[in-house]
Image: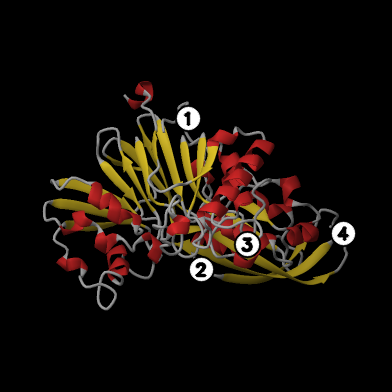
Amino acid sequence: MLIPTISKVSNVTQKPLELILARNLMSALSTPAFLVDEGGVLVFYNEAAGIMLGKRFEELGTVGPEEWGSLFGPFDEAGEPIPYDELPLVVAVRNGRPAHANFEISSADGTHHSVEASAFPILTAHGSQGAIAVFWPTASNGSAS
Amino acid sequence: MKVKLWGTRGSIPSPGPETIRYGGNTSCVGVTLSDGSMLALDAGTGIRSLGNALAAEPARLHILLTHLHLDHIQGLVFFAPAFRAQTEIVIWGPSSPEASLRDRISRYISAPLSPVEVRELPCDVSFRHCPQAEWEIGPARIRAASVAHRGPTLGYRIDDAGSSLAYIPDHEPALGADIDTLEDEWISGLGLAHNASLLIHDGQYTDDEYPDHLGWGHSSLSHAISFARRAGAERTLLFHHDPMHSDARLDELARGARERWQALGGDPSRIELAMERAEYELPVHTALAS
C-alpha cells in the first residue's frame, strides 16, 4: 500500500520521560509538590501546591531559575530571605543529592505557611533530569507579608 | 522506505484459525530503507519469517529493540541470518542501570531457556545502547526516546528520504495523564510521532478492558486514537493486539476505531488495525532526500 505523504518534520521538543512520569504522579498527589528540570526551571507544581501558594500553576506557567526562588519567599525563622542556592530543590538539582529544610513561604494573598521541604534529584541513565520537592505544611500563621 | 509487518500480536504468540488474518506472531516490523538496507524493529516471533525471507548473502542488519520483554525478543534465536557467518547484526536497545544490553539479552539466549549462547552465534553480532541524540543508519536518521511502559522502553522514529515512520508498540501515554488536554511536550512519545508519515502504535485493549490493566504499559483504543490525533500522523496502525482478540473481534474494533476517528474529524481510511504481512510504502521526497 502506497502512503501518499506530505513531508513534515516533528517540531515537538519532548520533555524527558522521567519528568513526564513525575508530573503525572504529582498530579495525582494531595501533597504539595514541585518539579524543576535539569536547568533549574520550575516546570510544574501540582494542585495542592497551587492551593498553598494561592496561585495555580496554569496561571503562573514555567518560571526560570532564580526567579521562582523569590516568588513566594521563602524566609527563615527570623523572616530573612533564604538564599536561592540553599533551597532544597536547588541543592538537589545542582548537587545531585537529596536535601531537606524548614522554612516559611508567602502565598499570593500574603499568608505565611511554615513548611518542611524534602527534595531529591531525578537521576536517569543519561544523568540528572531535574528534581522534585515535596512540601509538608507544618503551620499557617495567617500573617501578611 | 518500505514497511512490512511480520508480527503484530502482543504478549504471547497466538496462532490458530481465529487469528489467521491479523496474525499470531509477536512484534516485528521490517523496514527497507531507500538505499535497500534493512532494519528490523523488534524481534518477536515475527522475525523468524522476516529472516527466512532474506537472501542468504552477506549482509549487515540492524535490529532496533524497543525493550526486552519476551514478546519483543523471542524470535532472536530463530532468526536465520544470525546463524550465517557472513552476516553482521547490530542490535540496538535501551540502556539500563542494571546490566548491559548484551548481558540482559544473554539471559534469554542462554541455558536453560535457549540451546545456544550469544557467543555461539555464527554471525558477527554486536550490541549498542541507543544514544540520546539522533544517529544515522545508512540514509536514515534514527531517533529513540524513552516512552511510558514498564521498564526501560524506547520508541523509535525513522526519517528517510523525506518520509517518517514512528514505532511505539508498547505505550501507555495516558497513565495518570489527560492526553486530550496536556501540552504536546508533556505527552510521552509525542515528539517521536509528531507529523509521522506512518505511526505504528499500541492499541492492545478495548476501553472496557483497560481499567483492569491500568499501569500494565499499554493503551486503550480510545487513548491510542487520542494520541494519534494529537500526533497528527498521516496514517496510523494500531498494533500489539491482545492475544485474546480474535480476527472477528479485531474487525469489530477496527470498525469502532474508524468511527471514532471520523467522529473526531479524521479521515477513517487513515486508521486501521495492523495486519501481519501487510506492506506499506512511504514515498521518496527527493527535495528533502537530497
Q: Residue furthest front?
A: B17
Q: Nearer the viewer, mark 4 or mark 1?
A: 1
Q: Chain of mark 3?
A: B
Q: What is the number of the mark on residue A144?
A: 4
Same chain for mark 3 and mark 4? The answer is: no
Residue type, mark 2 in image:
Arg
Q: Position of residue A74 (x, y in %)?
A: 72, 61
Q: Position of residue B188 (x, y in %)?
A: 54, 51
Identify residue for label 2: A97
Question: What is the CA distance from the residue labelled 2 to the residue labelled 4?
Answer: 34 Å
Q: Look at 25% across and 33% down and name the residue there.
A: B35
User: Relative to B290, does residue B27 appear above or below in the rendering?
Assistant: below
- Location of residue A92 (image quadrant): bottom right
Contact check, label 3 and label 2, Cβ < 8 Å: no
**Mark 4 or 1 closer to N-term?**
1
Q: Chain of mark 1?
A: A
